[in-house]
């Protein structure tokens, strides 16, 4: 076997590269378990949360950690743990939509560019470069300026902004894959380009794309949390990690760390876990192709 | 000593008729004025050193490259331009199939041996499932593979076994011509001999025409009736394999023959000969 899939084209978090040796081992497993737990929390938040996340209890205002409130309460006396558990919902749903849309669009653009080549490729690649040159967060904020705050506009803006990351990767690995004789043998057999792409090319590049999408999930989670933190995304009083950090600022000034710290830690853990899983999948693909 | 020019295409001409093929890459001609005819059921070798345009020629014949000039006809049907539409694609696939050089890259790693042959049958023939399964077993049997290999993914197979699969897959479309581009070059010598025997048997039984592309003169001598010698994209000599390889007329062919290692072989003299020719 000669050429390996070019995973160097993956968008990576540089600091995490040192952790790559653990990509197959306990760290990878831990990251997968953490993400599974996160999904379970998002799904079963109403069962797991000890309190209504929006219930005000002024007597508990800024309460510290206790058996009543494991992670304390915020300035309005809302239970921080319950808000965290519910916050996993918007924390995952937004990035899920961003990643699903950008992955679909990126695959479409990348495969068409690689398969058709020539002018079609030039046009699509230029378009991706153009989108790439706009900072996604800024575009999302501009969208919000037009539509008003809420998650729809930022999610659409981020999905578009993330598409070139997927599209460029897909284009480069699809080009390599297309040149392989097994794809050419399907052409010689008389299959249409469309069938070959859907049945053979896509399944063979899918693991690499999945790795990129996992890494992107972490980025999207962070970007959307940042938007909510800035007040452009999820609006109070909805429990959301980004918005919770924002609301927790006041508590911080009054010496209560938990309302802002707890959601920050959740965001950080989720982002790191998604990156580790993405890197792990990428390593696995690279090993398989070697 | 000059290239044979193919008989210009007349109505009802049979076999594979290649006339004046030309292909440029970045302004440089990789193939230049290549013409030859492969009669139905015949076996023609294309030889020449690496980079002389053998693969490019083969790819134009099968339709993976479009020639810049020249024509390719099979059984009188023009197949020089890009195929338009499903019917034309399928018709061309049943004219010419190809076996690629690297058996490690020519099979979809996700598709089992039997499935990869069944796909071809499903595309080309209106067989029901049991008939298709019988035909798959028959094709695999023809290349010396059994049920165990049929169920396997390519990664479980050796290079020789994979090349057998590639041959069975090519035969599945019942082509009139099979192009083999360095089809045994990637295999061990003992496996090479087995595959060459297999191919000779298939040709005898099926009456398929072979176009055998190789840099290996011993292989070509074994399996072809006629041979075309390519140098820098152009034909320098052609004729019956035995006469071309025993009494070559062109100095380049002589040089190719002298380059084959054997007792009394002298690399220095060959290099000198090459310089004289350049
Ligand atoms: N896709 C391509 N792009 C550019 N140059 C090519 C391409 N394919 C082949 N060539 C060039 O054309 C020439 C003939 O190549 P090829 O047909 O592969 O030779 P052979 O099969 O006889 O070794 C070589 O110089 C090669 O570099
Ligand atoms: Mg070649």
Image: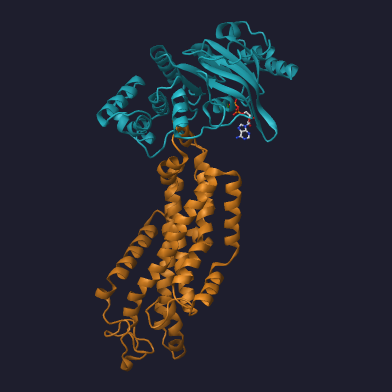
Chain colours: A orange, B cyan
Can the viewer see residue B158?
A: yes
Residue A93 at x, y percent in the picture? 38, 68
Ligand number 1: quarter of image: top right
- Of A157 and A59, which appears nearest the observer? A157
- Residue occupying the point 44% across, 40% down: A196
Q: In the shown orientation, is residue A131 left or right of residue A186?
A: right
- Residue occupying the point 58% across, 48% down: A121
Q: In the shown orientation, is residue B182 left or right of residue B150?
A: right
Residue A100, relative to residue B148: is it above or below?
below
Label total for image: 0
Residue A103 at x, y percent in the picture? 45, 57
- Farthest residue to the front: give it: B11
Which of the 4 image quadrants contains residue A127? bottom right
Residue A141 at x, y percent in the picture? 53, 74
Q: In the shown orientation, is residue A66 left or right of residue B254?
A: left
Which of the 4 image quadrants contains residue B173? top left
Residue B274 at x, y percent in the picture? 71, 18
- Residue occupying the point 44% across, 60% down: A101
- Of B170 and A92, which appears nearest the observer? B170
- Of B241 and A265, which appears nearest the observer? B241
Can the viewer see residue A275?
A: no
Residue B175, relative to residue A199: is it above or below?
above
Q: In the shown orientation, is residue B209 left or right of residue B113?
A: right
């Amino acid at each position: 076997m000669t050429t390996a899939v070019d995973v160097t084209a993956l968008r990576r978090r540089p600091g995490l590269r040192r952790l790559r040796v653990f990509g197959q081992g306990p760290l990878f497993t831990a990251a997968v378990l953490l993400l599974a737990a996160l999904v379970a929390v998002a799904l079963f938040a109403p069962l797991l949360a000890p309190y209504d996340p929006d219930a005000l209890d002024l007597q508990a205002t800024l309460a510290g950690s206790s058996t009543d409130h494991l992670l304390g309460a915020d300035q309005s006396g809302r239970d921080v743990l319950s808000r965290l558990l519910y916050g996993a919902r918007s924390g995952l749903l937004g990035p899920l939509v961003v990643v699903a849309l950008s992955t679909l669009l990126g695959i479409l653009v990348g495969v068409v560019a690689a398969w058709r080549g020539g002018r079609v490729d030039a046009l699509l690649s230029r378009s991706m470069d153009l989108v790439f040159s706009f900072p996604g967060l800024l575009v999302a904020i501009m969208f919000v300026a037009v539509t008003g705050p809420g998650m729809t506009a930022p999610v659409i803006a981020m999905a578009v902004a993330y598409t070139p990351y997927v599209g460029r990767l897909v284009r480069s690995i699809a080009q390599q894959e297309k040149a392989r004789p097994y794809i050419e043998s399907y052409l010689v057999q008389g299959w249409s380009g469309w069938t070959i792409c859907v049945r053979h090319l896509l399944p063979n590049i899918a693991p690499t794309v999945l790795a990129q999408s996992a890494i992107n999930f972490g980025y999207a989670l962070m970007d959307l949390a940042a938007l909510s933190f800035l007040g452009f995304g999820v609006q109070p009083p909805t429990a959301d990690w980004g918005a919770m950090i924002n609301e927790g600022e006041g508590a911080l000034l009054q010496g209560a760390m938990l309302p802002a710290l707890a959601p920050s830690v959740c965001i950080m853990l989720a982002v790191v876990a998604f990156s580790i899983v993405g890197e792990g999948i990428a390593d696995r693909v690279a090993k398989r192709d070697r | 000593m000059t290239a044979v020019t193919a008989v210009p295409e007349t109505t009802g001409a049979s076999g594979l008729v290649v006339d004046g093929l030309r292909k440029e890459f970045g302004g440089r001609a990789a193939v230049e004025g290549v013409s030859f005819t492969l009669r139905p059921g015949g076996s023609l070798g294309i030889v020449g050193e690496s980079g002389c345009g053998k693969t490019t020629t083969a790819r134009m014949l099968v339709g993976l490259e479009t020639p810049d000039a020249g024509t390719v006809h099979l059984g009188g049907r023009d197949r020089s331009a890009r195929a338009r539409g499903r019917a034309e694609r399928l018709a061309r696939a049943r004219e010419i199939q190809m076996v690629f050089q690297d058996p490690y890259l020519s099979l979809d790693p996700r598709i089992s041996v039997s499935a990869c042959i069944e796909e071809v049958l499903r595309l080309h023939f209106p067989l029901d499932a049991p008939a298709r399964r019988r035909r798959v077993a028959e094709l695999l049997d023809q290349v010396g593979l059994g049920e165990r290999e049929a169920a396997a993914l390519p990664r479980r197979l050796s290079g020789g076994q994979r090349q057998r699969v590639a041959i069975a897959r090519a035969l599945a479309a019942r082509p009139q011509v099979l192009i083999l581009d360095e089809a045994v070059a990637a295999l061990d010598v003992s496996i090479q001999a087995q595959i060459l025997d297999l191919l000779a048997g298939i040709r005898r039984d099926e009456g398929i025409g072979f176009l055998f592309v190789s840099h290996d003169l011993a292989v070509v001598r074994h399996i072809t009736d006629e041979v075309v010698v390519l140098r820098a994209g152009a034909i320098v000599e052609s004729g019956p394999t035995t006469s071309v390889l025993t009494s070559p007329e062109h100095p380049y062919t002589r040089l190719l023959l002298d380059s084959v290692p054997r007792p009394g072989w002298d690399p220095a003299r060959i290099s000198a000969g090459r310089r004289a020719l350049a």
